[in-house]
Image (spheres, helix red, strand yellow):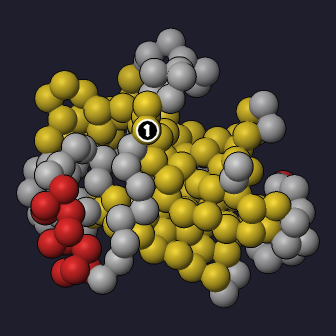
Amino acid sequence: MFRLPQILLDMVYIVTAIPYSTWKSVLLGIRFAEVARLQFVCWFDIGGRIDCRLLSPRTTYAAYLVFKLDSWSSGLGPPPHLASVKLGAYASEFNICLEDHDDRDEEEEEEEEGRRQRQRRRLRDDGWMEIELGVFYNDEGDDGDVEMSLMEVKALNSKHGLIVQGLEVRPKI
């Protein structure tokens, strides 16, 4: 499994990417010295955690995957990937796709999986894309760690071309 350590940057928490045997470290001249590029795998599990005490109390947060896709990326569309955010007894799970796909397929997948598509990816001002993994409420900061993950372990087709900058946690506006 690919796990991401945490760092603080400009009051937004970023969980940065580090290489794993199926990930290649790349330099892209961004706010981090390195990001990770998915090479060739049949499944992936990207995850991170952050201690709630580092976040503002009584605040609703959203967790995002910050990423790019190579022009040759493949296998990152349907079936959808499972995005989850867990805090204490609270857990949310949503289906998302990193690649563009046909809306007709999305409806079939939603019925099959019984989960709603959370949202589509969005292009950020910095040129990266982001997609929301889930939302959580940090009450008093005493619920332990927030765990965030994105995984695809059902379709064992080849997947490659995903570049991960990290997981970002910021107040939900």
Percent across and percent down for residue 74 are 14, 41
Classify 10 Å Cα crowding around label 1: few (below 14), some (14-19), many (20 and above): few
Residue type at numbered disc 1:
Arg
In this view, the residue farthest toward the top is 29
Percent across and percent down for residue 91 are 57, 79
Give me the residue at 87% from left, 56% from top.
Answer: 56
Left or right: 57 as drawn, with respect to 73:
right
Percent across and percent down for residue 80 are 25, 63
**Quadrant of res 25:** top left
Relative vertical location of residue 89 with respect to residue 168 in this rendering, above or below: below
Left or right: 23 as drawn, with respect to 15:
left
Q: Nearer the viewer, residue 170 or 155?
A: 170
Quadrant, the N terminus: bottom left
- Residue holding disc 1: 122
SS type, badge 1: strand
Query: How many numbered circles are shown?
Result: 1
Residue 116 seen in render: yes
Relative vertical location of residue 30 with respect to residue 58 in this rendering, above or below: above
Percent across and percent down for residue 90 are 64, 82
**Quadrant of res 162:** top left
Give me the residue at 35% from left, 77% from top.
Answer: 115
Give me the residue at 70% from left, 81% from top.
Answer: 88
In this view, the residue farthest toward the left is 157
**Quadrant of res 163:** top left
Residue 39 seen in render: no
Give me the residue at 85% from left, 72% from top.
Answer: 139
